Image (cartoon, rainbow, N blue to C red):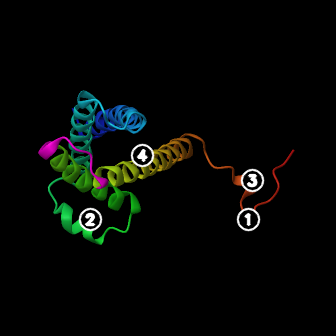
């Protein structure tokens, strides 16, 4: 399996797990997290989403220093991703300590919804780029509309 096919599989898995995590988050928000099993499902899905995100980043950057790249990265999606992951890890630690929901868990939920919105925008941009590059390589450019060209003969 080459890198492109692994990245494609990783991207599809990320989308699927993202949707499951979003459904889990909505369920937690609706029930205020009263069911312990639902919190565990969300924790497992969050860990899986974090692992897949790291794999996605690895497939793009390989073994380079990720933290140095992210420190200089101005992309809002990257910052929201790290903020979501760190707040989720801390909220999980607080929840495991006493099975109590904290204010940080609530903040994590709001940041997580921002992350889902940012991920959807990221996906839409990449799909649009991929489609435009695919069509530009298949369809030859229309030379009759170029600046300074003569009108085509009839």
Residue 144 — which label? 3
Report the residue marked by disc 1.
147
The alpha-carbon separation of the residues under discs 4 and 2 comes to 19 Å
Residue at 44%, 50% in the rendered image: 122
The reply to whether the C-beta atoms of the residues labelled 1 and 2 are less than 8 Å apart is: no
Q: Does residue 153 appear left or right of residue 13 in this picture?
A: right
**In the rendered structure, which disc, 1 or 2, sits on the residue that comes first in sequence?**
2
Q: Reading the chain from its start, which is encountered first: label 4 or label 2?
A: 2
For label 2, the residue is 70
Cα separation between marks 1 and 2: 42 Å
Q: Are marks 1 and 3 in contact (CB under 8 Å)?
A: no
Circle number at residue 116: 4
Label 4 crowd (10 A; few <14 / some 14-19 / many >=20) = some
Is residue 89 magenta-colored?
Answer: no
Which span of residues is magenta-colored?
96-103
For numbered disc 3, what is the local secondary structure? helix
Q: Where is residue 98 in the image (x, y as percent from the top left)?
A: 15, 44
Determine the residue located farthest toward the right in the rendered image. 154
Q: Looking at the image, is mark 2 or mark 3 earlier in the sequence? A: 2
Q: Residues within 10 Å of mark 2 (few under 14, many from 20)?
A: few
Res. 137 mark:
none
């Amino acid at each position: 399996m080459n890198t492109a096919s692994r990245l494609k599989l990783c991207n599809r898995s990320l989308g699927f797990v993202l949707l499951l995590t979003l459904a889990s988050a909505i369920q937690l928000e609706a029930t205020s997290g009263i069911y312990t099993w639902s919190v565990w499902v969300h924790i497992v899905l969050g860990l899986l989403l974090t692992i897949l995100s790291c794999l996605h980043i690895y497939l793009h950057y390989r073994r380079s220093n990720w933290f140095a790249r992210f420190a200089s990265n101005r992309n809002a999606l990257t910052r929201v991703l790290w903020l979501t992951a760190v707040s989720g890890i801390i909220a999980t630690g607080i929840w495991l300590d006493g099975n109590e929901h904290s204010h940080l868990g609530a903040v994590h939920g709001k940041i997580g919804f921002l992350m889902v919105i940012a991920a959807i925008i990221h996906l839409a941009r990449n799909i649009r780029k991929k489609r435009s590059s695919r069509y530009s390589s298949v369809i030859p450019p229309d030379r009759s509309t170029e600046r300074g060209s003569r009108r085509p003969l009839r």
